[in-house]
Image (cartoon, rainbow, N blue to C red):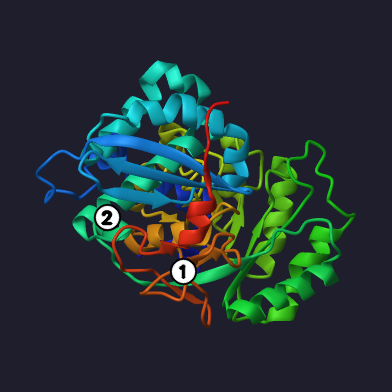
Amino acid sequence: MILHRRHLLGAGILALSAGRIRAQQEQTITVEDLDRVAQEPILRVEELTAPLEITALDLLRNGQEFLVRVRTRDGAEGMAVPNSMHLIHTYPIFVNRVAPFFLGKDARMLEDLLWEVSRHSSNYKYQGLALWVCVAAAEFAILDLLGKCTGKSIGDLLGGARRRDIAVYQASGNRGNTPEQEVDHLKQLVAESGAKAVKFRLGGRFRRDDADSLPGRTEALIPLVREAFGPDMTLYADSNSSYSVAKAIEIGRLMEAYDYAFYEEPCRFDHLEDTKTVADSLTIPVAGGEQESSEYRFRWMIANRGVDIVQPDLHYYGGFIRSMRVARMAHAAGMGCTPHMSGSGLGFLDAAHFVSCIPNPEPFTEYKGDPSIPVTSDTSSLSSENGVIRVPSGPGFGVTIDEQFVRQATLVTSG
């Protein structure tokens, strides 16, 4: 069981401050413990006894959407949908620096290759979204290949699927509309998906002056959403690096008063100590990590309880395997993990597959509407039904991308 501070406070230890509770939790795990957890093998492909030499790793484009197709010498193939929203800007890194590295490599060695690709031609100098979105694009396709070669789903490849039905929260991308308009929008999202949880945006986004997107919007919106949805709806809110420490604590206390379930990225995402100060001061769980690209900084967040819930983005952080290491470290520290969902491609499917196999998911997983690529599954409707999405159980991602859409896609080159 994952014990957040608010759960502990409700368990009869109100006399303890949030800071004292956190201090006790921090003593339960060491950096050495986390390193051991992170280094444990993840990928399960023992049944593949012969090498799977990669002979092609192609980037295809159809309009604004991309596909990645991997092929092996013996004719096996995998295909995946990357983060088109960012790859449209970073694709030369994929074509010139990432894809060439994987050619001639054994796909079974993917776990080790994710380290070596960062060293290849000093790719680590591109550390961050620019590199890891491209590495994730390659990893997704290779995982699909391995799934098809073994008959395993993504979850079974990554240690074993634990669950197939994933309860979702509906996330709003709005900021700057009035509180009343946002409530109406959230109601529409809930009506469409049946979700039992929602998340909306606070603050002015990546500010230095604590200014709101509209004067007073946040302070009005927090109670208004609770009033609109009642006590049984789970509510999350994301400030996207909006606040100084003092303002973040002020907003967090308002969220506590209205029983919100987590508070995402209250301070600048790279101000780890500031975020820890906020988390130490509040009882509401603080979530963060969507912008993170470093395993060591995630380790710091976990070892020092800089957040309560880790949020790796499967694309921004470089794929499923790296994100699984984060989830396992967090689990060892008694912390939850919920993937940040990139708003592109099949992000909802990626998040669902990840949650299917991690040991410590939060009660609800992010969901943002319909896919932008024509895709079907024999084992899932790929839709939220009464607030739940079923994870495909077929090999790899368990989906079929429309053949005509693939045929119409063209090969992307560095030119």
* Distance between the alpha carbons at the discs numbered 2 and 1: 27 Å
Question: What residue is rendered at 40% in x and 70% in y?
Answer: 377
Residue 295's x, y, as percent?
A: 41, 35
Instruction: Where is residue 23? Give x, y as percent.
Output: 44, 45
**Residue most extreme to the top:** 121
Occupied quadrant, residue 163: bottom left
Left or right of 174 in this view: 307 = left
Q: Taking 16 as reference, is 163 left or right?
A: left
Q: Residues within 10 Å of mark 2 (few under 14, many from 20)?
A: many
Q: What element carries label 2?
A: helix
* Quadrant (top left, top right, bottom left, bottom right) of the C terminus: top right
Left or right of residue 290, residue 47 in this image? left
Identify the image quadrant of residue 219.
bottom right
Q: Is residue 270 above or below residue 320?
A: above
Residue pictured at 63% horizontal, 49% vertical: 63
**Residue 269 percent across, percent down from the top left:** 61, 39
Residue 233 appears in view: yes
Which residue type carries mark 1? Pro
Q: Residue at x 84, y 72 (%)?
A: 180
**Foreground residue among 57 and 153:** 57
* Residue carrying label 2: 147
Of residues 237 and 94, the one nearer the viewer is 94
Side (left or right) of 390 relative to 411: left
Q: Is residue 304 visible?
A: no
Callout 1: SS: loop
Disc 1: which residue? 363
* Viewer-side label of 2, 1: 2
Residue ranking furthest to the right: 215
- Label 1 crowd bin: few (<14), some (14–19), many (20+), radius 10 Å: some
Give the residue type at disc 2: Gly
